[in-house]
Image: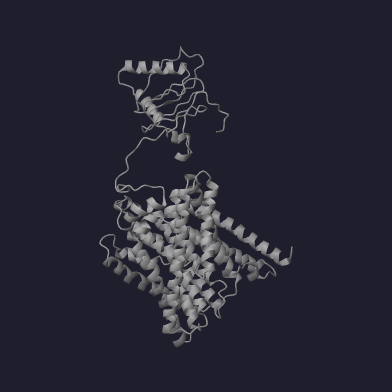
Amino acid sequence: MSEEEEFGHWGLLLFFALCVLAMLSAYFLRSRKILFLHETGASIIIGGLAGVCIRYFGGKLELKEFSSFKRDVFMLLLLPQIIFESGYNMKRRNFFRNMVSVLLFALIGTLISTFVIGGGLILFSHYTSVFTLTSIECLLFGSMISATDPVSVLAIFKELGVDLDLYANVFGESVLNDAIAIVLVDTFLAFEDSAVTTAFVFKALGTFIGIFLGSFAIGMAIGLLSSLLFKHVKLRHHPMIESSLIFLFAWCTYFLCEDLDLSGIAGILACGIVEAHYAYNNLSPHSQKITRQAIHVIAFISETFVFIYLGLAIFCFEHYLKFSLIATTIFLCLISRFFNIIPLSFLNNLFKKKRKLTAKQQFLLWFSGLRGAVAFALSVDLGTENGDVILTTTLMIVLFTVFIFGGLTQPLVKKMNIYASKEQKTTKKNKGFLRFDRKYLKPFFTRAKYNPNLYTEKPQTVPRNPLEEVYNLDPENQPQENNERTGLLSRDNPENKNEIENKYKSENVDDNKKDDDNNNNQDNQDNQDNTRYPDLPDFQNQSLSSDLSSENENQNQNQNQNQNGNQNGNQNQNQNQNQNGNYPILINQNHDKNDSD
């Protein structure tokens, strides 16, 4: 092993060990319900402490080489995972209900923020001579620092149960905003040697719109094709193949967009949203659970990795501090956020009859514009003339917003008393796109059939099918005939269904004691005949009398009693009774306990 490879292996070991510490700190914060310090802040602190140890106790190590990674690591391995998880695991119903305001804040708001920050830096740079950044670098820095990452704010919102519309707007804006900011950065990097003129601005905007819409169209197309594939091909019997295809379709989208000189980040975001909305419903329950958890785990590790790297960079990198640039940029970030939220909220409320954004919600939207992992990752290894200055400034702004704004979120939310109402927690009638989607798109791309009353009425309590407790599988995987080995009836056979229903009806116990005795005698006779199904207890919470002590010599002496009645059993016979009125589980008397199936 060469010296360079050994150096790289030690660096990876360091980062993975720090990730372990970050996970343990996250567990401590969650278990103690500490909200003033989020997991992201704890990861930064752990990275910072490791940076201090490396810098002052690491001997002659080359600090930046030991603890640095190239830009491709972030753009190819870390950011796509974070963006894809944001699209795949988003709360789609609230997102689509607030789609207009989310698109306003994410698309138009990010452009406003970019040009307010970039234009302000150009003015300060040219007319004050406090710091020297080229015009392209100012716009590049403005687009980069416009990427919001309110992870800590969203965690506090979720813990406190804030207004659902507020949560949907903050989350939706951050998801789309990251992709838009990355596209803007790539656009300005392509015009790095150009002069900033009016023609340049319109040309850059045209390029941005073309790249973003093209990437989104490719991502949506691949997501819809994957939905049709999962609908018509019976992959539900193979969960591992099914789950793997979800990831492969996403990565195909990313690299296809990159090869076409588009934005892989925007494409993989669109693919994640569409797959979550359509393809997810065609997956087996096992694959649904696998994909959600696996994608979330990968994204969580990736984001933790970025914040640890941010903490390491505080002490391991050579910094070029420009306090005037840092103060100016923080001021412009606050001003640009104001011109983003307030006018666009007014425009949103102007055309909206219901679910308007209140003044308190607008203030929290302005307050939640934290900068985080995406902005810092974009500033790493930028390659411009003043790239090191931009990296240091971005680092300071991320630290300021994460610790100051993130730490003040909890008392601010409690002070303003913005919580979800009971009306918001109940599902309402589908309107607009949601109604069109459920009536036409969902039936075409998924196995679901249109139900006009879905999500508009309170769901009725339906007795559970007894076989669902035994077969925790899909309906397609259930046996079509009686299973002689287990003694279970198939729920797909109408005759068996009628037999089960008749069996339950026959077990209803009357208040009269004579009827109770007759039913018990009949049950005992069934037990002696070794019938396939055990006697079924009453599911209307009435007690059953038992008089079997003298008739069965091998009867189990330890009988389980509950508050609602006694359960009668024969040798090797178990009965379960649901106290809520649901059907019990059917288990064969002669079933071999050593059989694993």
Q: Residue furthest front?
A: 232
Q: Residue at x 49, y 62 (%)?
A: 268
**138 over 273 or under it: above or below:** below
Q: Residue at x 53, y 67 (%)?
A: 258
Please state which of residues 204 and 350 is positioned toward the viewer in this rendering.
204
Q: How is the image coloured?
A: one colour
User: Picture quarter containing residue 352?
Assistant: bottom left
Q: Residue furthest top?
A: 550
* The N terminus sits in image quarter: bottom right
**517 over 37 or under it: above or below:** above
Q: Residue furthest right?
A: 1
Give coordinates of residue 492: x percent, y percent. Answer: 42, 34
Give coordinates of residue 106: x percent, y percent. Answer: 40, 67
Can I make out residue 180 in this image? no
User: Picture quarter containing residue 7?
Assistant: bottom right
Please state which of residues 301 and 584 is positioned toward the viewer in this rendering.
584
Give coordinates of residue 574: x percent, y percent. Answer: 48, 26
Q: Residue at x 55, y 55 (%)?
A: 23
Question: Could you tell whether 391 is left or right of 5 in the image?
Answer: left
Please state which of residues 190 and 124 is positioned toward the viewer in this rendering.
190
